[in-house]
Amino acid sequence: MDLKNLESLSFFGPELILTGTILLLIVLDLFVQNKRNLAVLALVGSLASLVATFDLYSAPQGWLFYRMVVLDNFSLFFKVVTLLAAICVIWMSLGNREVRQVYQGEYYTLLLTSALGMFFMASATNLLSAYLSLELVSLTSYVLTGFLPRNRRSSEAALKYLIYGGVASGTMIYGMSWIFGMTGSLDYAAIQQALAAGEMNRVALFMAFIFVFAGFGYKIAFVPFHMWSPDVYQGAPIPFTAFLSVASNAAGLAILMRFFFAGISRVTPDGAWESVTAVEWPQVIFYASILTMTVGNFCALNQKNLKRMLAYSGIAHAGYMLMGLAILTSDGLIAILFYIVVYLIMNVGAFLVVAMIGNSTASEDIEAYRGLAWRGAALPAVCLAVFLFSLTGLPPFAGFIGKFLLFAAVLKEGGIFIVLALVAVANSVVSLYYYAKVVKVMFLDTPEAGDNAVALGCNHYALLIPLTVLTIVLGLYFQPLVQYAALSLQFFVK
């Protein structure tokens, strides 16, 4: 299937629904007095788009809009992940203290616009559409990061994010120009054919891939393009921080996987992946994975702010997921897809507890969690402990299965990859220290005189409890999610 513009619209339902919701939010914001209704509209629009996305699984796969984007199971998977993250974050935003301070019409409009950009990141099969989609996500993210009024920390975070993003964007488009000059095309399929057919200058091609990897990879905050992450996580509104930590990372991985696998690699007759160029780009990802998980975990050890700790934790988890790219196998990719869903559940749950406690205490420091279980917040404390132990990778939680699949895929390749797996295991042990430190503060530290009882609203429990249950259930019964991840690993490359 290779459709033109008007023909493609019939397979563009999720994007059209999201676009219509965004336009409605812009118009209704001028008239609606109760801004909570705008959140409800954003929630309904996201749910409708999710239903339309699932409906597309029965549609034929193929190119849309003159081969600028593609419809396949891989893109649908990331659309589902993005919408689930958006739905959770919109629900989290209802009644959130920080969101009540901002212009809510613009907030939900920008949030859904960012989600729309992530749709295109997952389905882009052309370097131009990939660049434009990433810029759409980046520009809306810059604004949302600095959305808190009269907050110097938020403004500073937005400025740092803009500077780092601008550098990464310029680096990426410079690499794209090299690829276009050497292959004569921006289309992934044409690039793959050109690389397979002709002898390219290996040094020039290697530098081009490094530049593109840097531009795409800054969205998942891999080292050394991670320095924006802690400040942005700390300065942005907590619900948007949760969205950034899961949806943005997922979209960054989607665009990396689409380019480095469907774009410059191919499947051999025996079902294995191989690079179509002599450039050893998996080795670059190998060392980036080791560096990213190590820096992320060790920098998280001494953090006193829980949002900054989760930021460095997110960097470390990006390193774990890069392992699945480095081994260049389908098992590695399936493990990444599984881990993305599990990470969404764990991290959104952790940030939800941070938002709940922040609403009551107006603090994000770990000290604010001292004796939390004995100050009227026993259930959130237990839930946060579940999420943190799952992020560590302890059984019987979903994070254990996610890491097990990643480590098993890496160990299956043997050789130098055994070192990669050992480094990942060592880093998981290191991470236990700072995750357990928070649990210890909540349950074992004695509340002091200034630690007042925590008053919590009931609306967040409707999201917190299902996320906690899923974290436990997917650690015990995970086969359906593994099957869904395997089904989603279908790139349309004809």
Image (cartoon, rainbow, N blue to C red):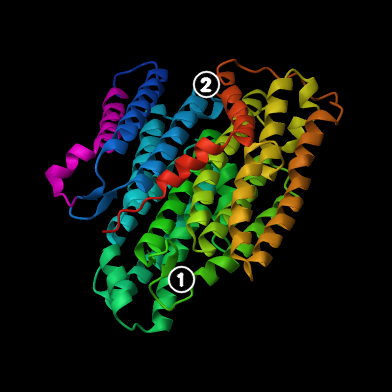
Q: Looking at the rendered structure, which numbered label has been put on residue 291? A: none
Provide the residue span drawn in magenta: 1-29
- Which residue is pictured at 59% across the width and 64% down the height? 413
The disc labelled 2 sits on which kind of residue?
Gly
* Residue 144 % position (x, y): 45, 40
Judge whether 79 appears above or below 279 on screen.
above
- Which residue is pictured at 62% across the width and 54% down the height? 408
Principal secondary structure, stretch drawn in magenta:
helix
Count of marks, rendered view: 2
Label 1's element?
helix
* Residue 487 % position (x, y): 41, 44
Judge whether 387 appears above or below 491 on screen.
above
Marks 2 and 1 sit apart, C-alpha to C-alpha, by 43 Å
Q: Looking at the rendered structure, which numbered label has been put on residue 95? A: 2
Q: Residues within 10 Å of mark 2 (few under 14, many from 20)?
A: some
Task: Determine if the magenta segment contains residue 26.
Answer: yes
Q: Which residue is mark 1?
A: 210
Q: Quadrant of the C terminus?
A: bottom left
The disc labelled 1 sits on which kind of residue?
Ile
Q: Marks 2 and 1: which is nearer the front?
A: 1
Tag 2 near tag 1, CB within 8 Å = no
59 to the left or right of 470: left
The foreground one among 256 and 133 is 256
Q: Is residue 152 visible?
A: no
